[in-house]
Amino acid sequence: MKKLVSSIIVLACCAGIVIGQTPAGKRGGSTKKKVAPNRRAITTDKAPRATGPLSQAIVAGEFVFVAGQLGVDPKTGEFVGSGIEEQAEQVLKNLSAVLDAAGSDVSQVVKTTVFLADMADFNAMNEVYRRHFRVDPPARSTVQVARLPRNARIEIEAIALVKR
C-alpha cells in the first residue's frame, strides 16, 4: 500500500499537480460549472413543464433545440386523447409554444425527429404534421420506439433557427 501511495504522489508531481493546492491561476471554492454565455434555457407555461433534469428548450447561438414534446395539455397535465391525431396535434401546439418562447416559430424549424409508439400511425401523423409544416417542411427522421414516456403515442423534438 505504501508503494502505491508513493507511486501516485510521484505521478501527480510529474504531471505538475501539487496535492492539496489549487492549480496556479485558479481560485479555490465552488466547483459549480459555468454555463456558456451564448446558451440559455427556455421555459414557458404554454407547454407542459419539463419533468426530470431537462429544459423545454435550449437556445445556443443561432439555434433552439426543443426537447421532445408529448400530446399533453399544459393546463391539465393530461393527454388530450388516446388517438394519434389528437396527440400529434397537441404535440405540435406544444412545440410551437416552446419555439415562440425561444424567439422562433415552426417556419424556422430545420430538423425534427418523430418518435412513434406504432409505425402503423405514420400516415395519420403525416396528415397532422403536414398542416403545421406547409411550406418547405424541415428535414425529418421518424422512428418507432418500444415505449414513450407516460405511454404516449407520439413525441417530437426539433431544432430551429432563432428569428432575428
Image: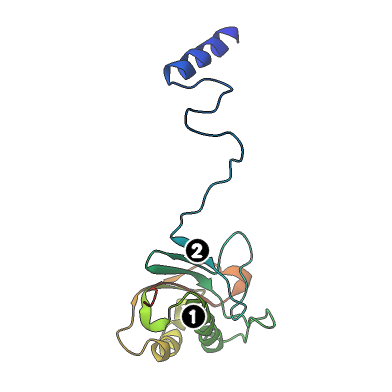
Image position, residue 41 (x, y; %): 53, 65
Number of residues whose C-alpha sits closer than 10 Å to that of mark 1, classed few (under 14), some (14–19) or many (20 or more): some
Q: CA distance from mark 1 to mark 2?
A: 15 Å
The colour scheme of the drawn protein is rainbow
| Residue 133 figure quarter | bottom left
Which amino acid type corresponds to the residue marked 1 in the rendered image? Asp
Mark 1 vs mark 2: which is more N-terminal? 2
Instruction: State the residue lying farthest toward the right.
Output: 76
- Work out whether 110 lies above or below 54: below
Where does label 2 land, which residue?
40
Label 1 with label 2: CB-CB less than 8 Å: no
Image position, residue 78 (x, y; %): 67, 80
Where does label 1 land, which residue?
100
Residue under the point 46% across and 61% down:
39
Residue under the point 63% across and 83% down:
73
Residue under the point 52% across and 14% down:
9
Image position, residue 65 (x, y; %): 44, 68
| Residue 47 figure quarter | bottom right
99 sits left or right of 32 in the view = left
